[in-house]
Image: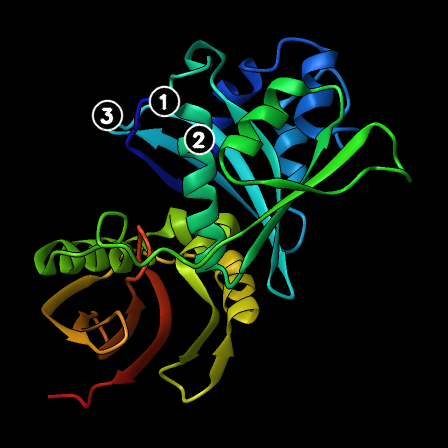
């Protein structure tokens, strides 16, 4: 019986890359990790460049102590999430240890947050340990790889997680998680990292800016990545409230040297971590 491992997915950072690359010791391991998408020797820059592909979101998986134990990426289109670059720290692998199953569980949760109802993946046909792990996690073979004999296609259908055991269920925990996520989006390092911002924004995210302009998700990610000179602002007057349908409404004030503004955000908290659904800012009149 596999041990239940507490694991969480978070946006992958550049600080993770060295450790992930160290898990892939040779060209054969690289082929199992990425097929022909990457070349040996694998470098941090090569992995970073691949996962800067439009629409691809990369995640690091951490355990209860915050140690990096795995990695995966997702690309969602038409309700289907393509799961790729799946790897567990080699030191934590082995039947009965639960790390592979835990990683696939949190990958499914992240796919649901990004709007997917099905997770699909390609696995090298000769990689029998991986195929067994996917089967134990609920994946089934949906194509025999007749066009590519070296590849087996598998998928798993699921409902986005709303079980209290995996969702943010306690009121104070929800509010703390939302505040931390909101502050993360006010961090210059986060705003410059399209992967991290993308993981924090709902697929249908909309913002009404202080100028009145309406911003969609892709526009927001691109604008923040190109932003220059942003400094983490001073904030105060934080207020939180639960909204029907698994959401939290948060309002707060940004206090600036020249002008202040009032902000309101609606966060979806049905998954293991919040995602921002809507944001609006309004410049306050001078006092």
Q: Is residue 259 visible?
A: no
Q: Quarter holding the N terminus? A: top left
Please tell me which residue lies in front, 199 or 256: 199
Question: Separation of disc 1 and disc 2 at Cα?
Answer: 8 Å
- Give the farthest residue toward the right: 147
User: What kind of element bears circle 2?
Assistant: helix
Where is residue 56 shown, x and y percent of the image? 61, 50
Q: Is residue 88 visible?
A: yes
Disc number for residue 101: 2
Residue 95 place in picture, x, y as percent: 45, 15
Closer-to-camera residue (44/111): 111
Mark in the foreground, 1 or 2? 1
Determine whether, in the image, residue 177 is placed left or right of residue 13: left
Question: CA–CA distance between discs 3 and 2?
Answer: 18 Å
Residue 117 location in percent, x, y?
A: 53, 60
Q: Which residue is mark 3?
A: 65
Residue behind mark 1: 2
Q: Residue 119 at what x, y percent from top left? A: 58, 49
Q: In the rendered image, which quarter contains the C terminus?
A: bottom left
Left or right: 51, with 267 as reference point: right
């Amino acid at each position: 019986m596999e041990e239940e491992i507490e694991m969480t997915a978070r946006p992958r950072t550049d600080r993770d890359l060295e450790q992930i690359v160290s898990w892939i010791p040779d060209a054969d391991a690289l082929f199992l990790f990425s097929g022909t998408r990457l070349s040996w020797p694998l470098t941090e820059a090569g992995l970073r460049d691949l996962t800067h592909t439009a629409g691809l979101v990369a995640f690091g998986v951490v355990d209860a102590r915050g140690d990096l134990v795995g990695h995966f990426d997702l690309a969602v289109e038409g309700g289907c999430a393509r799961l790729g670059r799946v790897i567990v720290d080699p030191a934590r692998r082995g039947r009965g240890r639960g790390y592979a199953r835990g990683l696939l569980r949190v990958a499914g949760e992240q796919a649901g947050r990004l709007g997917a109802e099905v997770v699909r993946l390609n696995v090298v046909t000769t990689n029998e340990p991986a195929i067994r792990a996917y089967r134990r996690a609920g994946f089934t073979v949906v194509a025999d790889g007749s066009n590519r004999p070296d590849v087996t296609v598998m998928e798993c259908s699921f409902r986005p997680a709303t079980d209290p055991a995996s969702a943010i269920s306690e009121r104070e925990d929800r509010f703390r998680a939302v505040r931390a996520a909101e502050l993360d989006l006010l961090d210059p390092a986060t705003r410059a990292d399209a992967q991290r911002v993308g993981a924090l924004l709902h697929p249908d995210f909309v913002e009404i800016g202080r100028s009145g302009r309406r911003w969609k998700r892709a526009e927001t990610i691109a604008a923040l990545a190109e932003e220059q000179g942003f400094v983490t602002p001073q904030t105060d007057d934080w207020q939180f409230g639960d909204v029907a349908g698994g959401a939290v409404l948060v309002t707060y004030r940004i206090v600036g040297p020249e002008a202040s503004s009032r902000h309101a955000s609606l966060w979806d908290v049905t998954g293991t971590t919040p995602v921002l659904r809507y944001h609006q800012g309004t410049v306050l009149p001078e006092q």
